[in-house]
Image (cartoon, grey):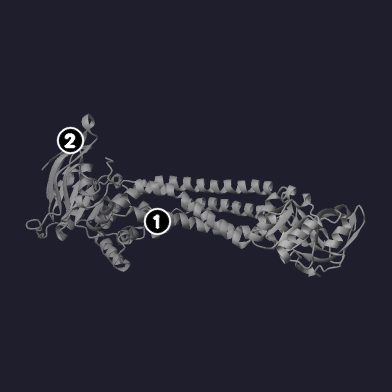
């Protein structure tokens, strides 16, 4: 299943406010002589309609970077602003609700809940937000259709292939209509064809619906689908 | 709640295993409770069910009827203070035969017009001037019937069985109620003394009587505790019950703790996508409560069913209120034992969902 990217794309990037803004964000552990710098001060701005790839070798600080961008980790210095909200003014207890409302995660592994079928993986998200179940079901059906998963709607994750699982993860990440999508090595454990499909899906969502996406990857084969590529090497971010 | 039940449904074997163990432990707790209560009733149903609130004995008898000998003077002093709320009773042990069957019991002399008079379930009640006895229904299992003549040993005096009553057991033996005058005729060695005076009054009058010289007053519960053997029997059985409940708590705590540990990647994922710790904790508690309630219910039903199959000789008493109380205790203990797992859930860092596998 491939999507063409030849249609004229609405260009959101030019005049819109950034969805994600990291200003001088760094992360250090320990103190004094034992200080470890996982991420040196980094600045990155991602606008609606942009798919930014974060490239780099293992252990370079990509995960730390993604965690900070995904409101999962507080930076040691710097400011994180997502959808106009400065995260510093949110308490730790308020972060989960914020993530539920604004962010979508596509993770590397353990993406799916083992005891829920595909449809329930999706309706889980509005369920957690306490939203109406009828709208939720409709939205889930639409997304399942969009991602070609309708026939698998009642299957459990152990009956799905790797590519199908990632597609379910993408559908799930889209259920709350997020402004920012964070993807952690989404093509790991997928072959080139399936891997490319997955990134094409993400790119399509980003471009068609004005979302922003930050994708950590060291898969060079899909970098051409991204609008920008930044690298992190030894904790240093380079554009 | 939805997440909780879906998970139990998906891992059916595991859920049934844990539920089964909880049900087994609950069953053991119920059976032991029934046996403990049954033993208590077999020993002292009379003191458990009596309408009396207090008992007066001599000071040196310390509440044990068989060691206490109150003179008529003593009885008069008590009735002077308590009026109609006081009535004397006299206890002795008796060996007797019914036909060629040798049996034993407790002879209890009472005033048939007082509140100690037994309620009959068959036959006629005890009245003044009558020489027969109203006996505990447990003697029926030994073949005693209405109208039978019991022959006391070694003297050969006879007692006609006038009626049967329930819950009249003392010192693990059936009680045979006779009038005080009949009792004194059968026990000439007592020389007109009685064992105790039963009171049906409040603490104020009771303490007044307790102040009388040479006498002490015991509440019904206290008298029960000093009954020879009662405390020791109940103590051992109760200790076993307590241990059982503690074991249940530990088993459930460990099970849920280990299962929760196994699920930390899942919790990390759920927290990352925005589930609050409260909803995850709620789901865990819901699961645990659901399993426990179902398990306890099944155990209660099995217990009630099994009770009908118990051999007749085994003392077993399990009332519905007691069963309910034990069930609630187990469920509360289960809830507390899940606290350990809740701590684990709270400590899970959503960061673990961002994993560097490659």
Going by the image, does A48 lie left or right of B29?
left
Relative to residue A45, is residue B304 depicted above or below? below
Q: Quadrant of the N terminus of chain B?
A: bottom left
Q: Give the residue at x 34% y 52%.
A: B277
Mark 1, chain letter?
A: B
Residue B282, percent across and down?
Answer: 39, 56
Q: Nearer the viewer, mark 2 or mark 1?
A: 1
Please tell me whether mark 2 sits on a helix, a strand or a loop: loop
Q: Give B259 or A96, whichever is nearer the viewer.
A: A96
Residue B272, percent across and down?
Answer: 28, 51
Relative to residue B320, is residue A213 depicted above or below? above
Q: Which residue is mark 1?
A: B283
Quadrant hosting residue B143: bottom right
Residue farthest top in this picture = A33
Residue A35, percent across and down?
Answer: 22, 33
Residue density around tag 1, few if under 14, some if 14–19, many if 20 or more, within 10 Å: some
Q: Give B10 or B291, whichever is nearer the viewer.
A: B291
Residue density around tag 2, few if under 14, some if 14–19, many if 20 or more, within 10 Å: some
Residue A234 image label: 2
**Residue B107 visible to an observer of this rendering:** no
Q: Give the residue at x 28% y 43%.
A: B355
């Amino acid at each position: 299943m491939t999507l063409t990217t030849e249609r004229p794309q609405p260009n959101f990037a030019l005049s819109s406010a950034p969805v994600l803004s990291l200003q001088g964000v760094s992360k250090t552990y320990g103190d004094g002589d034992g200080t470890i710098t996982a991420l040196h001060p980094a600045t990155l701005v991602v606008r609606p309609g942009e798919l930014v790839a974060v490239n780099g070798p293992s252990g370079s600080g990509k995960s730390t970077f993604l965690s900070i961008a995904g409101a999962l980790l507080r930076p040691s210095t710097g400011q994180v602003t997502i959808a106009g909200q400065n995260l510093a003014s949110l308490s730790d207890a308020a972060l989960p609700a914020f993530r539920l409302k604004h962010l979508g995660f596509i993770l590397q592994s353990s993406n799916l809940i083992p005891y829920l079928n595909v449809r329930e993986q999706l309706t889980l998200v509005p369920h957690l937000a306490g939203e109406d179940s009828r709208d939720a079901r409709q939205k889930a059906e639409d997304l399942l259709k969009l991602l070609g998963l309708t026939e698998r709607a009642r299957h459990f994750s152990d009956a799905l292939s790797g590519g199908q699982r990632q597609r379910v993860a993408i559908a799930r990440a889209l259920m709350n209509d997020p402004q920012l999508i964070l993807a952690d090595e989404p093509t790991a454990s997928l072959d080139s064809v399936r891997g490319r499909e997955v990134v094409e899906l993400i790119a399509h969502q980003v471009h068609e619906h004005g979302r922003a996406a930050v994708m950590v990857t060291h898969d060079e084969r899909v970098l051409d689908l991204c609008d920008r590529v930044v690298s992190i090497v030894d904790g240093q971010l380079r554009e | 709640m939805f997440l909780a039940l879906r998970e139990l449904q998906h891992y059916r074997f595991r859920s049934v295993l844990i539920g089964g163990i909880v049900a087994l432990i609950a069953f053991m707790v119920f059976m032991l409770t029934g046996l403990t209560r049954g033993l208590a009733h077999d020993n002292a149903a009379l003191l458990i069910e009596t309408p009396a609130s207090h008992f007066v004995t001599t000071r040196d008898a310390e509440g044990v009827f068989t060691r206490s000998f109150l003179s008529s003077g003593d009885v008069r002093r008590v009735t002077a203070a308590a009026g109609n709320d006081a009535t004397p009773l006299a206890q002795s042990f008796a060996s007797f035969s019914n036909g060629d069957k040798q049996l034993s019991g407790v002879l209890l002399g009472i005033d048939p017009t007082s509140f100690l008079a037994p309620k009959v379930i068959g036959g006629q009640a005890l009245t003044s001037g009558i020489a027969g006895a109203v006996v505990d229904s447990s003697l029926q299992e030994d073949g005693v019937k209405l109208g039978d003549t019991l022959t006391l040993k070694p003297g050969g005096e006879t007692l006609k069985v006038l009626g049967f009553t329930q819950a009249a057991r003392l010192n693990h033996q059936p009680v045979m109620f006779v009038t005080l005058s009949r009792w004194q005729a059968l026990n000439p060695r007592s020389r007109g003394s009685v064992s105790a005076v039963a009171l049906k009054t409040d603490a104020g009058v009771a303490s007044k009587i307790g102040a009388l010289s040479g006498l002490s007053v015991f509440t019904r519960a206290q008298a029960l505790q000093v009954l020879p053997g009662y405390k020791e029997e109940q103590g051992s059985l109760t200790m076993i019950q307590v241990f059982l409940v503690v074991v249940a708590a530990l088993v459930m705590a460990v099970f849920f703790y280990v299962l929760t540990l196994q699920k930390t990647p899942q919790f990390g994922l759920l927290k990352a996508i925005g589930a609050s710790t409260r909803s995850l904790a709620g789901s865990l508690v819901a699961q645990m409560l659901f399993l426990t309630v179902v398990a306890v219910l099944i155990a209660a039903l099995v217990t009630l069913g099994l009770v009908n199959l118990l051999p007749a000789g085994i003392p077993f008493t399990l009332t519905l209120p007691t069963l309910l109380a034990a069930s609630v205790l187990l469920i509360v203990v289960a809830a507390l034992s899940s606290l350990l797992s809740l701590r684990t859930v709270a400590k899970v860092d959503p960061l673990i969902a961002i994993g560097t596998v490659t």
